Image (spheres, rainbow, N blue to C red):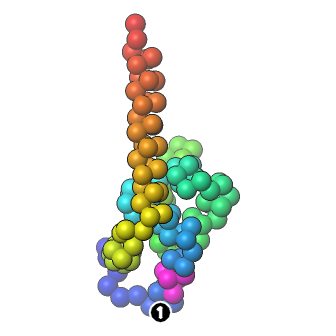
């Protein structure tokens, strides 16, 4: 479901969410990578758990972010109904250096995670 119209109050919440660099970086990562946990965001952005959680809570309260629980993990994503407006905003920020660096950091962390998983699987299947 996409938003076709929204109230001035909701629009203000969206724009306030985009008024902080930390929140913009979080929204960008969630938009690009679909779903991340607090620990993923901490590692990529170099934020403390407290700072990351505070900004995620703000984004949830602003109506931009969904969450789902899986065991002890909580994963966050951009709400489908606001993805179009988020996409439009990031179309203008697509060459921002700090946002591009965040994506590079994600890629390194993701490849390291795969390496770690491969090592664990190798130990499990080693005769």
| Residue range of the region highlighted in magenta in the rendering | 12-16
* Residue position for label 1: 8
List x then y, in percent, for residue 8: 47, 92
Please state the horizontal and vertical placement of residue 6, each as a whole percent of the image. Answer: 40, 87
- Residue appearing at x 61%, y 60% in the figure: 52
Q: Position of residue 7 (x, y in %)?
A: 44, 91
Name which quarter of the figure residue 97 lies in: bottom left
Q: Is residue 44 above or below residue 29?
A: above
Tell me how many marks there are.
Answer: 1
Residue drawn 39% across and 15% down?
125
Callout 1 crowding tier (Cα within 10 Å): few <14, some 14–19, many ≥20: few
Placement of 102 over or under 70, stated as above or below: below
Q: Is residue 15 left or right of residue 81?
A: right
Secondary element at tag 1: helix
User: Which image quadrant: the N terminus?
Assistant: bottom left
Mark yes or no: residue 22 visible: yes
Q: Is residue 60 visible?
A: no
Q: Residue furthest top?
A: 127
Quadrant occupied by the C terminus = top left
Name of the residue lying farthest toward the front: 97
Q: Main secondary structure of the magenta part?
A: helix
Residue at the extreme right: 50
In which quadrant of the rendered view does residue 51 lie?
bottom right
Q: Residue 48 sits in which quadrant? A: bottom right
Q: Nearer the viewer, residue 11 or 99?
A: 99
Asked if residue 70 lies in the magenta stretch, the reply is no
What residue is rendered at 35% in x and 88% in y?
5
Magenta span has 15? Answer: yes
Q: Position of residue 12 (x, y in %)?
A: 51, 87
Above or below residue 75? Residue 12 is below
């Amino acid at each position: 479901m996409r938003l076709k119209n929204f109230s001035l109050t909701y629009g203000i919440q969206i724009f306030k969410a985009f008024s902080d660099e930390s929140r913009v970086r979080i929204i960008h990562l969630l938009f690009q990578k679909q779903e991340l946990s607090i620990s993923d965001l901490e590692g990529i952005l170099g934020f403390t758990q407290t700072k990351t959680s505070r900004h995620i809570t703000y984004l949830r309260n602003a109506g931009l972010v969904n969450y789902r629980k899986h065991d002890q993990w909580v994963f966050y994503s951009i709400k489908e109904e606001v993805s179009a407006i988020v996409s439009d905003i990031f179309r203008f920020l697509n060459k921002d250096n700090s946002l591009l660096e965040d994506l590079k950091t994600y890629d390194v962390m993701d490849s390291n995670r795969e390496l770690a998983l491969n090592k664990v699987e190798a130990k499990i299947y080693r005769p």
